[in-house]
Amino acid sequence: MILDGEARMAGCSGDCDQVLYLVLASTIFLGSLGVLWAGASAQGSITVSGFDGRSVVIGFVLFVACAYVLGVPFGIPIILALLLREFAQVMAYRMLGHRRARFRFVPFMAGAGISDDPLKSDGEDFLVAIMGPALSLGPVAMGAALALVLRDWAPSLSTSLWFFAATCGAVNFVLLLPFAPFDGARCMRAAVASYWPALAPAAAVFMSTAMFTASLRTGSVALMVGAAFGAQSLLHRAERGRVPLKPDHGLLALAAYAFTMAAHFSAGWWLFGAYFR
């Protein structure tokens, strides 16, 4: 009788945890939708660029490369994570009042920015840079919560959702590294430019050194490549002439950057542990 009661209590506790996770994930997801709605309802137009034969070939090559290195279940989530990041940045430009924005299917091959109008301040640059990873927190949290809830009901679907959550988290963590031209370099520079300009390159040096040390200990080629990429990012020059953030706003921006990076690292930890060693 006592064992049966303890089993029922354990089952109830597990169900309550699943409900709590789902409620929290739903709250984050709905918040993301609210931000997207603000961008979608802004005045202006969105054009699509890069949807041609070349972009399809590049997308296919990217999918094959990701599937070969990480496995087929990770190929599609990586593509989705990158497209979500691009869409979120388009919404950020619209929220900032840019009436013409373009969605680029292959951003690194597009040869043009999302908007032809320049960003006016470090605050605007930070918003655009953080928007992709920040809005991705909703789908990542929802995917992880549904994977937990559906684990016993639909194992195959649960596994797919877990792959998506872990992969999307890992991709966004990489995007938030303080290495140019990643979004993290823009976030770090904008957040600290008003009170400690040297912190941005110092963070890149620290992260690159940590990756290099870890690669020597583990023999990871991926970490060695990341360290080299971080080192070359120090050669990039930041854009000048933008209105800086106030010191208090810079601290808030730095806190938001650190929280978003930590959240995506937690989501992608399983993928890092499985493949980057």
Image (cartoon, helix red, strand yellow):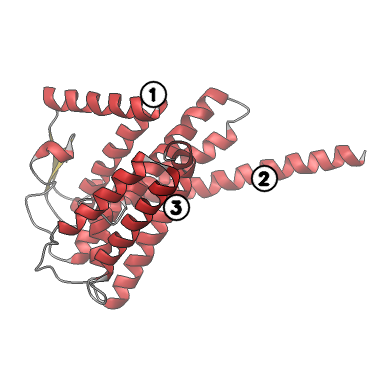
Give the image quarter of residue 237: bottom left
Amino acid type of the residue that numbered disc 1 sits on in the rendered structure: Val
Q: In 3D space, how far apart are the residues under numbered discs 3 and 2 (Cα atoms)? A: 22 Å
Q: In 3D space, how far apart are the residues under numbered discs 3 and 1 (Cα atoms)? A: 25 Å
The local secondary structure at tag 2 comes to helix
Q: x%, y% of residue 238? A: 14, 62
Mark found first going from the N terminus, 3 or 2: 2
Report whether 3 appears left or right of 192: right
Residue toward you, 131 or 271:
271
Count of marks, rendered view: 3
Mark found first going from the N terminus, 2 or 1: 2
Residue 254, placed above or below residue 182:
below
Please name the residue that numbered disc 2 is placed on. Answer: 16
Residue toward you, 71 or 161:
71
Q: Which mark is residue 72?
A: 1
Residue located 23% across and 75% down the image? 194
Instruction: Tell me if mark 2 has few (under 14), some (14-19) or many (20+) residues whose alpha carbon lies within 10 angstroms of its own.
Output: few
Q: Is residue 155 visible?
A: yes
Amino acid type of the residue that numbered disc 3 sits on in the rendered structure: Ala
The local secondary structure at tag 1 comes to helix
Q: In 3D space, how far apart are the residues under numbered discs 2 and 1 (Cα atoms)? A: 34 Å
Q: Quadrant of the C terminus?
A: top left
Residue located 34% across and 57% down the image? 209
The local secondary structure at tag 3 comes to helix
Please name the residue that numbered disc 3 is placed on. Answer: 263
Please tell me whether mark 2 or mark 1 is closer to you in this view.
1
Q: x%, y% of residue 82? A: 28, 38
